[in-house]
Amino acid sequence: MASSPPYPTSSYSPGPGSGPHPHWWQRPWVRYGSLITLLALSGLVILALVRRQTGTEGFLVGLGLAVLPVPWLIAAFRWLDRVEPGPWRNLVFAFAWGACAAALIAIVANSFATKWIATATADPAGADTLGATVIAPVVEESAKAAAVLLVFLFRRRDFTGIVDGVVIAGLTATGFAFTENILYLGTAFGTDQLSGDRGIASVTAATFFVRVVMSPFAHPLFTVLTGIGFGVAALSADGRTARRVLVPLGGLLLAMSMHAFWNGSSTFGEYGFFAVYGAFMVPAFGLLTWLAVWTRQRELRTVREELPAYVYAGWLGPAEPFVLGSMRARRMARDHARQHFGGRPAARAVAEYEAYATSLAFLRHRGRQGKAGADFIPRERELLGALWERREVARPALEYAAAVTAPVPAAYQPVYGYPVVPYPTYNPYRS
């Protein structure tokens, strides 16, 4: 019986480029430092504005109540992002942008526009209605969309599809809603303090019920439409410039329209708010939730379909496409590595292996569709090199998970030392 061939070695070693040194303003520490400073200043200003409007006691009450839905929303978006986890820095940036920069832009712009309209028309009530139904949706959704745009432009490697757009948009909106809820709940508490109202009939309780219990998903739901638009643009080929511009704009316009419809529901009569909530918001939330979960399952299917080519080439073990295409098997592999191969560092290595393999599957999928960029080959070699560095820990853990959860079909069992798989029509190694 012939022996198995040795696994390939990667000739790619990522490192700094050989070109000229970038200018000082192009260095990563300058960009990161500027961004952190901007967000920190925005946070300090928004903190001062909210505290001035609500008072210290109102601010603390609003903060304590507004934080309640945040962990659940973050956990939901992180669950959705588990197939190909995005870097934490992108997620932290999205939440911080929504809570600080976008909230500051919205407060300043909405207040200025509403006061200008009230002065110009001498109709304060009409200005408030116009501000809530027209000005606020345009300003707020544009401010939140800026975070998605920045990640799309400057972290393009991490933005590969619809799920990435949904996660970045959702976390940005979660941060924005968090700050907005502090303002609304703190103001409601101040109103109750002045009027002496207490208990379940208070303004604070009513505000909490509407904003935190009934509709914590409202802002994420609106902005996710923008994220889907950018996700579709990320899946488009490089040459389709019009689609890359128009689809995100369409998503942004839909987000503004849904936001305006929701804000205007209070003007539809005594039960207008509840009618819009039950007949429109809840079904829309259910539809987008289904779409997000379906997209997540499609990503797992892509992993199972694309990675066998690398089994044939010797980079992956025969069972790995099946294990990497199952979240249960992935979790089992990490747990096994943690218990038997070195604790948390081993589990982290397996998690990194799973993430790199998933990125490799998505890269190959885009390549077969003709949507890969000019950096396809260097990126593929970089990912393969990262997998090869972690194989000694990851492979036994993945084989264990496969034996328990997903036995390898006969068509993928090694025959005479070589794995037999259907060879794809697209060969990434062909010159």
Image (cartoon, rainbow, N blue to C red):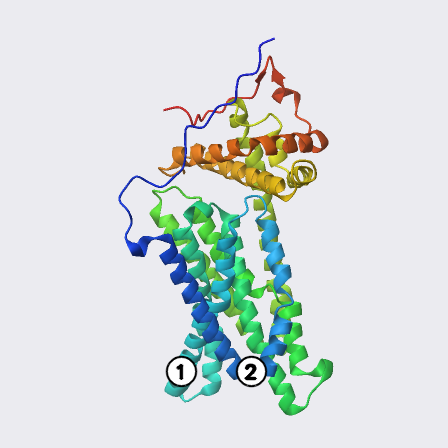
- Tag 2: amino acid: Thr
Which numbered marker is on residue 117?
1
Where's the C terminus, which quadrant?
Answer: top left
Where's the N terminus, which quadrant?
Answer: top right
Residue 265 seen: no
Q: Nearer the viewer, residue 268 or 399?
A: 399
Which numbered marker is on residue 176?
none
Image quadrant of residue 426? top left
Callout count: 2
Say which residue appears at 26% left-offset and 44% top-offset: 20
Determine whether the residue tagged by mark 2 lies in a helix, strand or loop. Answer: helix
User: Does residue 196 appear left or right of residue 352 in this picture?
Assistant: right
- Disc 1 to disc 2, how far (Cα)? 24 Å
- Tag 1: amino acid: Ile
Picture coordinates of residue 132, whole percent (x, y)? 49, 76
Say which residue appears at 62% left-offset and 67% top-offset: 215
Q: Nearer the viewer, residue 143 or 36?
A: 36
Identify the mark nearer the N-term, 1 or 2. Answer: 2
Q: Nearer the viewer, residue 362 or 292?
A: 362
User: Does residue 413 appear left or right of residue 93 in this picture?
Assistant: right
Is 278 situated above or below 410? below
Which numbered marker is on residue 54?
2
Is 273 situated above or below 93? below
Determine whether the residue tagged by mark 1 lies in a helix, strand or loop. Answer: helix
Residue at the outermost front position: 342
Say which residue appears at 52% left-offset and 63% top-offset: 173
Q: Nearer the viewer, mark 1 or mark 2?
A: 2
Q: Residues within 10 Å of mark 1 (few under 14, many from 20)?
A: some
Say which residue appears at 38% left-offset and 62% top-offset: 34
Picture coordinates of residue 146, whole percent (x, y)? 42, 61
Residue 378 seen: yes
